[in-house]
Amino acid sequence: MENDKYVPIKTIIYLIRHAETIDENGIRNTDETSQMINEKEILSIEGEETSKNLGKNVELKNIDVIWSSSYTRAKQTAKYIASENNLPLNLDYRLSERKLGNLDEISMFMKDKKTRDPSQEQLAYPKFKTSDGESAEDTNKRMTEFLNETLEKYKEKRVAIVSHGGSIKFLLLNWCEVNKNMKLEYKGKELNISSPCLLKLTFENNEVVNLEQIV
């Protein structure tokens, strides 16, 4: 019909980095046992408070579904959003933090780098990984796979995804540039993937048409 107008299908994805964790002494990510310890890292008292406040953010009202990494700190952040929306919490291993791997190899990689954050440096070296770790490309692949499945399953819905700093950064490489400060930019605006952060991605027919930082 002549009066019919094409209406794009919009889906909203909220990418959320977990809140602040408690300071712990000890070595992590050097073997499978320490990796398990890393996965069980908990939020600090301040992290619990910021998670509560995040759960009440107006952008996260009337969410249709919420997904989280299985790591404890992510679930502790996600539970407030789930509670505010009276939703069950769904878990997927693909939302986990990238496996950093052997610390000695990381130290060698970070020698003479501009920042002290391996995940930022891996933005510029997406193929780098330790002998028992994941690269930015590896992490991007599983995160993108999850996102594509989510976009197909929840068309025209509002979806909250709680994950981790490195994994979120590496997913954002799909749409963002890395600037001279080793930070991600979307259309010239620098993003700050701190703990916590809240990013809003608007998709039309599975393509990003807008990306903005809310928190």
Image (tube, rainbow, N blue to C red):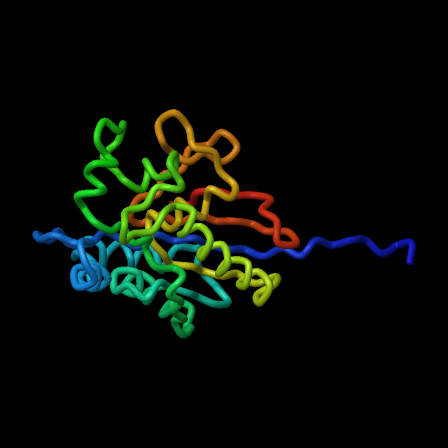
- Decide if residue 49 is on the left or right side of residue 151: left
In the image, is residue 196 above or below residue 91? Answer: above
Residue 40, image x, y percentages: 21, 64
Residue 185, image x, y percentages: 45, 34
Q: Quadrant of the C terminus?
A: top left
Residue 28, image x, y percentages: 16, 54
In the image, is residue 172 above or below residue 148? Answer: above
Q: Nearer the viewer, residue 195 or 111?
A: 111
In the orientation shown, which residue stands out farthest toward the right?
A: 2
Residue pictured at 31% horizontal, 44% vertical: 194
Q: Quadrant of residue 22?
A: bottom left
Q: Nearer the viewer, residue 69 or 161?
A: 69
Q: Quadrant of residue 179?
A: top left
Q: Quadrant of residue 83?
A: bottom left
Residue pictured at 40% horizontal, 67% vertical: 92
In the orientation shown, which residue stands out farthest toward the left?
A: 25
Residue 213, image x, y percentages: 43, 43
Q: Quadrant of the N terminus?
A: bottom right
